Image (tube, rainbow, N blue to C red):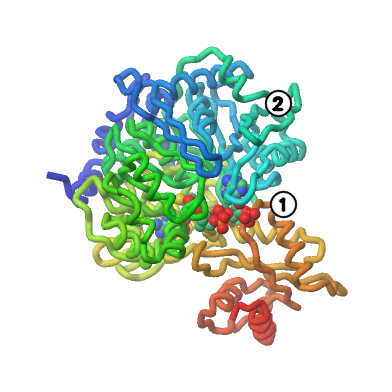
C-alpha cells in the first residue's frame, strides 16, 4: 500500500536528518559525508558536508555500470529541424566523456565556469553533463535572450569558455546565435579563451579562429576523461534569473544536495521509477529544463525527452500527444501557458483523441498559476490526474505539490498543492507573524531551506541575504503572495515584487523599463504586467516622450519594441506601447505602477490619496481605449 502524504510529511518533521540520510542513499558517493548539514555559517547552510560526489557519474556512468547501457537515456525530437534521435546511456557516456575531454583540452578544470548558449539540441545536454564530469560550473543562458543579456551573464560568471551553436530554429524563422554570441563576447568586459560552436545542418557559420572551435570536431577527436569527484557543496551550475532590477541574480546550485532532492522527488512527487519515460516540455535555459529535462530523469535512470518545438504550430496542436504516443511517455510536465495554447486551437480535444495516450500516467504543471479552466480541459480530455505544483529557480525542485508517488490528495483548483517534505511554508505579515488560514500574506519558507535549494547567489552572499532573508527573520522570502487554506493547501496568488510571468518565462518589469528608457524618444516610462489569455501576462509600456517629439504612436511603438528586443531579447514579448503626457505619480514622485496595472486589467481601484494629479488617470484610460484595450 502506498504511504500517505501526512505520513511522509510527518516523517520529515519528526526526524529531518533521518529523512535526508535515507534519501541520500539513492546516490553514489565517492566519499561519504560527515554530517547531514552544516549550520555553523547560518544563514548559509551546506548539505552533506565532508562528502564527495560527481553528478555526471550518478546521471550517466553508474547506469551503464549497473547494466542500463543499452536503455535509451535521451530522445531528441525536433519537429522544427525534422530530426528524431535516440541516445542510449552507453551513447551518452561516450559523447559526454569525450566532450569533457575536449573541454579539458581547452584548459577547463574544476571550478571554471562554462557559459552555454544553445538551443534545444542534444549537444546542449552533453555539454552540461561534460561540465559536471570535470567539475566545471555551467551557466546556461536561454536562447531567447539577446546579446546584451548574454554579456551581463558573461561578466558575472566570468567563464573560461562559452559553448554555443550556430543557431536555433523557431517555427517561423531561424535564429542565428553566432552574431549574438560575437556581439556579446565583444561587449563583455570579461574575455573568454574560446567559443566552442556546434554547427547545425542548414545553419553553417564561419568560425573566427583561433578563438572559435568546432564543437563536433572537438567532441569527436578528444580522449574520454573520467569523472572528477567534487565536494558536496561544489556548485554544479549557476542559473541567472530575473530580480527586481535589470541585473540578473546568479542562483547557485550545489552538487550533492541537489541530487538527493531530485532523486527524492522523482518517485514521490512524480511517481516515476527507473526505466520510465519522462518528458518536461520546457527549455534547458530555465530551471525546469535543468532539473527535469536533464538531471532528475537521468539520475533516476529514466528516458528523458528533449523536444525542440512548440505546443502549437509545430505542426499543430496535436504535437504533444504525438510525442507521448511515439515514445510512450509516462509523465508529462509543462507550463499552463502551453495548455492554454493547445486548448485555444483544439477546444474540443479532437487532436487528443487521434493518439494513443495509454502510457501517460499524469500531467504536471508549473511555472505560473494554473488556471482552473486549463486544468479542467486537460482532465476532461486526458482522463488523468493533472497536478499543479509550485517552485522557483531558487528552490530547484517543487516546494508545494500533489504526490503522484503517494496516495494522491484531492485536487483543489487554484491551489498548487501541499508543502513538500523539507519545506515548512508559512504565510507571514509585515511583522513576521503567521497569518491565519485563508488570509493572504507573504509566502515564506522557514530556514534552513531543504537540500537542492540555492545556498547563495554567485559570489554575492550579501545580495542573497538582502534579496531573500531580510524581509522575514529566520525565513526565506519567496517573493510570492498567497494563502494556506484550512486543509493546508498552498495557494500562490501573485508576486510581491515587479516580476512578471510571460508564457512561463520569468521577467522583471524593472529590467524591461531600463530597456524602454534607453529608446531615444523616451524621456520617462513605466512597465507593468497586464493579464493575457494565452501568456498569462504580457508587459505593457507607458512612455512619456521628450518635448517636441511628434512622431506617430506606431513609430514610437516600433522604436521601443526594437530596443527591448535588442536589449533583452524577443522573449520579453513587448507588443504594446502607450504614449502618455505624464505618468501618474505620488506627490513624492513615486510612479503609481499598481494603479496603472489595475487600469490596464480593468480592475476596480481606489484613486490613491497621495496622487499628485488625478486627471492623468482619465487620460491614460482614453489612451488605452484608443489602442483598442477597452
Ligand atoms: N531562442 C530564440 N528565440 C526564442 C526562443 C529561443 N529559445 N524562445 C522563444 N523565442 C522567441 C520567439 O521566436 C518569439 O519571437 P518573435 O516575437 O520574433 O516571434 C518570442 O521569443 C516569444 O516567444 P514565445 O514566448 O515562445 O511566444 P510564442 O508566441 O512564440 O509562443 C507559447 C507562445 C505559449 C506557445 C510559448 O510561449 C510556449 O510554448 N510556452 C511554454 C513555455 C515554457 O515551457 N516555459 C518553461 C516554464 S516550465
Ligand atoms: P521561475 O523562477 O522562473 O521558475 O518562476 C518562479 C515563479 O513562478 C514563482 O515565484 C511564482 O511566482 C511562479 N510560479 C511557479 N509555479 C507556480 C504555480 N504552480 N502557481 C503559481 N505561481 C507559480
Query: Which residue in the rendered view is the most extreme toward the left?
Result: 1
- CB-based contact (under 8 Å), mark 2 and mark 1: no
Residue sitting at 69 percent across and 41 percent down?
A: 151
x, y percent for residue 430: 45, 65
Secondary structure under the numbered disc 2 in the rendered image? strand
Tally the numbered discs: 2
Residue 516 in which image quadrant: bottom right
**Residue farthest front in this picture:** 354
Q: In this view of the protein, which residue sits in the foreground, 251 or 187?
A: 187
Q: Separation of disc 2 and disc 1 at Cα? A: 24 Å
Q: Quadrant of ligand 2?
A: bottom left
Q: Residue at x 72, y 70 (%)?
A: 543
Q: Is residue 187 above or below residue 432?
A: above
x and y, in percent, of residue 143 in the image: 60, 44
Residue depicted at x 74% and y 57%: 563
Q: Position of residue 40 (x, y in %)?
A: 41, 35
Q: Check disc 1: other Cα within 10 Å, few if <14, some if 14-19, many if 20+.
A: some
Tag 1, which secondary structure?
helix
Q: Nearer the viewer, residue 448 or 554?
A: 554
Quick check: 376 above or below 313?
below
Q: Position of residue 74 (x, y in %)?
A: 42, 32
User: Between residues 22 and 621, which one lies in front from this camera angle?
Assistant: 621
Which of disc 1 and disc 2 is earlier in sequence? Answer: 2
Read off the residue under disc 2. Answer: 212
Q: Which residue is mark 1?
A: 566
- Residue 575 shows which numbered tag? none
Amino acid at each position: 500500500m502506498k504511504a500517505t502524504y501526512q505520513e511522509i510529511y510527518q516523517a520529515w518533521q519528526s526526524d529531518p536528518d533521518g529523512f535526508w540520510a535515507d534519501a541520500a542513499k539513492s546516490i553514489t558517493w565517492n566519499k561519504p559525508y560527515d554530517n547531514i548539514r552544516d549550520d555553523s555559517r547560518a544563514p548559509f547552510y551546506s548539505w552533506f558536508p565532508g562528502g564527495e560526489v560527481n553528478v555526471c557519474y550518478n546521471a550517466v556512468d553508474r547506469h551503464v555500470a549497473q547494466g542500463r547501457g543499452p536503455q535509451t537515456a535521451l530522445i531528441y525530437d525536433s519537429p522544427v529541424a525534422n530530426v528524431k534521435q535516440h541516445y542510449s546511456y552507453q551513447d551518452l557516456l561516450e559523447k559526454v566523456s569525450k566532450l569533457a575531454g575536449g573541454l579539458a583540452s581547452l584548459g577547463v578544470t574544476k571550478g571554471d565556469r562554462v557559459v552555454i548558449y544553445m538551443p534545444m539540441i542534444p549537444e546542449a545536454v552533453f555539454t552540461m553533463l561534460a561540465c559536471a564530469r570535470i567539475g566545471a560550473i555551467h551557466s546556461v543562458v536561454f536562447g531567447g535572450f539577446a546579446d546584451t543579456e548574454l554579456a551581463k551573464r558573461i561578466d558575472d560568471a566570468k567563464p573560461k569558455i562559452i559553448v554555443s551553436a550556430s543557431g536555433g530554429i523557431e517555427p517561423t524563422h531561424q535564429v542565428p546565435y553566432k552574431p549574438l554570441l560575437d556581439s556579446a563576447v565583444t561587449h563583455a568586459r570579461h574575455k573568454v579563451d574560446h567559443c566552442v560552436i556546434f554547427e547545425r545542418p542548414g545553419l553553417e557559420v564561419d568560425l573566427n579562429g583561433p578563438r572559435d572551435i568546432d564543437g563536433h570536431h572537438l567532441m569527436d577527436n578528444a580522449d574520454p576523461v573520467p569523472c572528477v569527484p567534487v565536494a558536496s557543496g561544489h556548485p554544479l551550475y549557476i542559473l541567472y534569473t530575473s530580480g527586481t532590477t535589470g541585473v540578473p541574480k546568479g542562483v547557485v546550485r550545489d552538487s550533492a544536495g541537489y541530487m538527493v532532492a531530485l532523486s527524492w522527488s522523482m518517485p514521490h512527487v512524480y511517481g516515476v521509477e527507473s526505466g520510465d519515460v519522462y518528458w518536461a516540455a520546457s527549455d534547458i535555459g530555465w530551471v525546469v529544463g535543468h532539473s527535469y529535462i536533464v538531471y532528475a530523469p537521468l539520475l533516476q535512470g529514466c528516458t528523458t525527452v528533449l523536444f525542440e518545438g512548440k505546443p502549437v504550430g509545430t505542426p499543430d496542436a496535436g504535437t504533444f500527444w504525438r510525442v507521448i504516443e511515439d515514445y510512450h511517455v509516462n509523465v508529462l510536465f509543462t507550463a499552463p501557458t502551453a495548455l492554454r495554447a493547445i486548448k485555444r486551437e483544439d477546444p474540443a480535444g479532437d487532436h487528443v483523441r487521434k493518439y494513443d495516450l495509454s502510457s501517460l500516467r499524469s500531467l504536471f504543471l508549473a511555472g505560473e498559476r494554473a488556471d482552473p479552466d486549463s486544468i479542467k480541459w486537460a482532465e476532461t480530455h486526458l482522463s488523468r490526474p493533472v497536478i499543479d505544483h509550485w517552485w522557483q529557480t531558487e528552490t530547484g525542485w517543487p516546494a508545494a505539490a500533489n504526490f503522484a508517488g503517494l496516495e494522491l490528495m484531492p485536487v483543489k483548483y487554484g491551489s498548487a498543492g501541499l508543502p513538500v517534505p523539507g519545506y515548512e511554508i508559512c504565510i507571514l505579515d509585515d511583522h513576521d507573524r503567521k497569518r491565519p488560514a485563508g488570509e493572504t500574506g507573504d509566502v515564506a519558507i522557514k530556514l534552513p531551506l531543504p537540500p537542492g535549494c540555492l545556498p547563495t547567489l554567485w559570489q554575492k552572499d550579501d545580495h542573497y541575504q538582502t534579496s531573500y532573508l531580510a524581509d522575514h527573520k529566520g525565513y526565506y522570502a519567496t517573493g510570492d503572495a498567497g494563502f494556506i487554506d484550512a486543509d493546508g493547501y498552498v495557494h500562490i496568488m501573485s508576486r510581491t515584487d515587479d516580476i512578471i510571468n510571460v508564457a512561463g518565462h520569468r521577467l522583471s518589469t524593472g529590467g524591461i523599463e531600463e530597456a524602454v528608457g534607453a529608446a531615444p524618444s523616451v524621456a520617462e516610462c513605466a512597465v507593468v504586467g497586464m493579464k493575457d489569455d494565452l501568456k498569462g501576462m504580457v508587459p505593457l509600456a507607458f512612455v512619456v516622450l521628450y518635448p517636441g517629439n511628434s512622431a506617430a504612436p506606431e513609430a514610437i511603438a516600433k522604436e521601443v519594441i526594437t530596443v527591448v528586443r535588442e536589449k533583452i531579447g524577443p522573449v520579453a514579448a513587448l507588443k504594446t506601447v502607450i504614449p502618455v503626457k505624464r505618468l501618474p505619480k505620488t506627490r513624492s514622485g513615486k510612479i503609481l505602477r499598481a494603479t496603472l496595472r489595475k487600469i490596464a486589467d480593468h480592475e476596480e481601484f481606489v484613486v490613491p490619496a497621495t496622487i499628485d494629479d488625478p486627471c492623468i488617470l482619465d487620460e491614460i484610460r482614453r489612451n488605452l481605449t484608443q489602442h483598442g484595450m477597452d
